[in-house]
Image: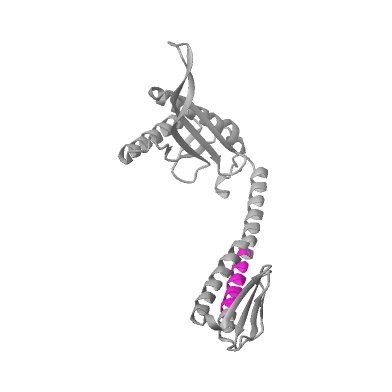
């Protein structure tokens, strides 16, 4: 259990205790020393009796279980212990699931690597996801939607022109995640013959195989906004080449077994 959780629970219990002590502050005294909290009950003659002690490691020693404040604290402490036990159980179950999933993933990868691969003329199915836009391009919701749709359609048309690649909306071998944005860059001004800062149009493509995690590539092209179509086309052609030459040879012949 994390230290933060202990601190939160201890704070909640302390607040509950403060509320109780506020109602009978004349009869109790809480003392803290070196990380240890001790609650005393003080009688009318001023004699102090220890009710309970909270040790530095968080354990509680109750010396008077019949004391009403001790009963309240002990009940809260028991609830806290139950919650912590439950959370520890959930955490252990998550670790077991993670280990199981990791083992299954590793087995799947070994099988893919050992499986016969697709032929050179077999199609590669690609899903082109809707592009993500930078803040400046996404300012107007209606315009942004149309821009994303135009870009997605343009990429799909250009990459689908390849004789090997086929754009699909389901059961793809490869996912393409485009992203476009403006970023400041330095360029050479032919009139002043000096380097200047300009806002350039950037187009990034994240390419991920559905089979091997290492078949993951990111490419980027940039240029003037008026050249945006050429920038996207260059990135799309590069993505197509990577899919054919880098990812394609690792796609299993019986692809449906691994999707």
In the rendered image, is residue 2 in sight? no
Q: Residue drawn 36% across and 37% down?
A: 149
Q: Residue drawn 48% across and 14% down?
A: 194
Magenta span includes 85: yes
The residue nearer to you, when weighing 160 against 106, is 106
Quadrant placement of the N terminus: bottom right
Q: Which residue is outermost to the front?
A: 45
Determine which quarter of the picture holds residue 246: top right
- In this rendering, is residue 65 above or below 132? below
- In this rendering, is residue 82 above or below 232? below
Determine which quarter of the picture holds residue 251: top right
- In this rendering, is residue 196 above or below 215? above
In the rendered image, is residue 25 in sight? yes
The residue nearer to you, when weighing 180 against 128, is 180
* Residue 153 point in image, percent of width and height: 38, 34
* Residue 15 point in image, percent of width and height: 52, 72
* Residue 185 point in image, percent of width and height: 48, 25
The residue nearer to you, when weighing 217 against 2, is 2
The image's colouring method is one colour
- In this rendering, is residue 2 above or below 144? below
Question: Left of 28 or right of it: where is 222?
Answer: left
Q: Which residue is outermost to the left?
A: 142
Magenta span includes 236: no
Question: Left of 250 or right of it: where is 228?
Answer: left
Task: Please identify the dominant SS of the magenta region.
Answer: helix
Q: Which residues are magenta?
A: 75-91
Q: Residue drawn 63% across and 50% down?
A: 108
The residue nearer to you, when weighing 192 against 43, is 43
Q: Residue drawn 53% across and 31% down?
A: 219
How many numbered discs sit on the rendered protein?
Answer: 0
* Residue 121 point in image, percent of width and height: 55, 32
């Amino acid at each position: 259990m994390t230290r933060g959780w202990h601190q939160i629970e201890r704070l909640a219990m302390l607040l509950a205790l403060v509320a109780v002590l506020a109602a009978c502050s004349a009869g109790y005294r809480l003392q803290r020393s070196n990380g240890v909290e001790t609650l005393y009950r003080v009688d009318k003659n001023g004699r102090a009796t220890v009710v309970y002690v909270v040790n530095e490691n968080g354990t509680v020693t109750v010396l008077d279980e019949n004391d009403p404040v001790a009963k309240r604290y002990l009940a809260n402490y028991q609830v806290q212990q139950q919650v912590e036990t439950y959370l520890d159980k959930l955490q252990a179950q998550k670790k077991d699931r993670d280990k199981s999933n990791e083992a299954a993933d590793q087995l799947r990868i070994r099988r893919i690597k050992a499986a016969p691969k697709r032929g050179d003329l077999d199609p590669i199915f690609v899903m082109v996801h809707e592009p993500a836009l930078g803040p400046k391009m996404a300012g107007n919701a209606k315009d942004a939607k149309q821009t994303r749709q135009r870009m997605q359609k343009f990429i799909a048309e250009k990459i689908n022109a390849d004789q090997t690649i086929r754009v699909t909306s389901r059961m793809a071998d490869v996912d393409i995640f485009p992203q476009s944005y403006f970023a400041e860059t330095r360029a050479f001004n032919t009139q002043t013959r000096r380097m200047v800062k300009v806002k350039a149009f950037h187009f990034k493509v994240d390419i991920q195989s559905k089979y091997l995690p290492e078949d993951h590539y990111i490419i980027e092209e940039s240029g003037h906004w008026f050249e945006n179509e050429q920038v996207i086309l260059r990135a799309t052609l590069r993505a197509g080449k990577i899919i054919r030459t880098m990812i394609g040879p690792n796609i299993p012949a019986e692809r449906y077994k691994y999707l």
